[in-house]
Image (cartoon, grey):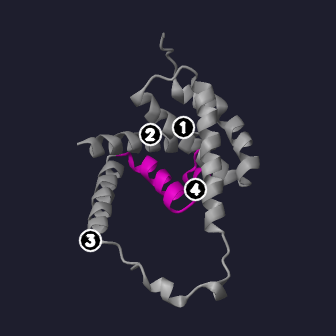
Amino acid sequence: MKRLEFNLDKLFFEHRNTLIKMLFPIVGCYHTAEDLSQEAYLKVSCALRQYPIEFPRSFLYQTAKNLALDHLRKEKVRHLHVDQDQIDPSTFEIASPTPTPEHSLQIDQQVKILHKILASQPQQRREMLVLHKVHGWRYDEIAKYMGLSRSAVEKNIRIALSFCLEAYCSAEEK
C-alpha cells in the first residue's frame, strides 16, 4: 500500500472550523469543541509517528468525534447524582485522598519534565499556552491581551502543544 504524504498542519488549519462546528452540537460548548479539535490534532500527530494513515482527513474527524463522545461519557459520570441518604458514611473512609509516595514521585517527575519543555519554548508562546491551558483564557482574550491576531494565537498554541507533546513523548521513551 502506498503511503500518502500530506501536511497535518495544513489539513488541520483547513478543517479546524468545520471540526469545531461538528463537535459543538455534541458537547454543547464552543470552547470545549475548540479544545477537543486541538486534542484531535495532537492525537493524529502522535498516531502518524507510529503508523501511516491512509485517509488522514477521515481519521482526524473520527478522532475528534471519538474524543467528543469520550468527553460526554466522562461528563455523565462526573454528574451522576447519587442520593446521599443511601450512602453509608463509613464508605468515605475506605480510600485515603492522599496520593501514594510512588504516585507523588511520578507526578513530580512529570512536572519537572513539563517545566523543562516549557522553558525551552519562546517566552511569548509559553505565555500563550499557559494562559490558555492553565488559566482557561480563550484565544480572543489572549489575542487582545498580547496585541496579536486570533489566528496567530491559535497557530502559536498549536505549535507549542505539538512541541510539548513531541518532547514529552521523547522524554518518556528515555
Residue that mark 3 sits on: 101
Sort mark 1 into few (<14), some (14-19) or many (20+) by Cα contacts within 10 Å. Answer: many
Instruction: Identify the residue shown where x is 57% and y is 60%.
Output: 136
Q: Please, what secondary structure does the residue beneath circle 3 have?
A: helix
**In whole angstroms, how far apart are the C-alphas of marks 3 and 2?**
31 Å
Residue 3: x %, y % from top left: 47, 14
Tell me, yes or no, if residue 149 can be seen here: no
Residue that mark 1 sits on: 41
Instruction: Point out which mark residue 3 bears.
Output: none
Instruction: Identify the residue shown where x is 69% and y is 42%.
Output: 20
Which sits in the foreground, 76 or 44?
76
| Dominant secondary structure, magenta | helix
Report the residue that reaches farthest toward the top.
2
Give, as a three-letter code, the residue at label 2: Ser
Q: Please, what secondary structure does the residue beneath circle 4 have?
A: helix
Instruction: Point out which mark residue 145 bears.
Output: 4
* Nearer-N-terminus badge (3/4): 3
Tell me, yes or no, if residue 89 can be seen here: yes
**In whole angstroms, how far apart are the C-alphas of marks 4 and 1?**
26 Å
* Left or right of 100 on screen, residue 10: right
Report the residue that reaches farthest toward the right.
25
Sort mark 2 into few (<14), some (14-19) or many (20+) by Cα contacts within 10 Å. Answer: some
* Nearer-N-terminus badge (4/2): 4
Given this view, does label 4 or label 2 mark the residue nearer the observer? 2
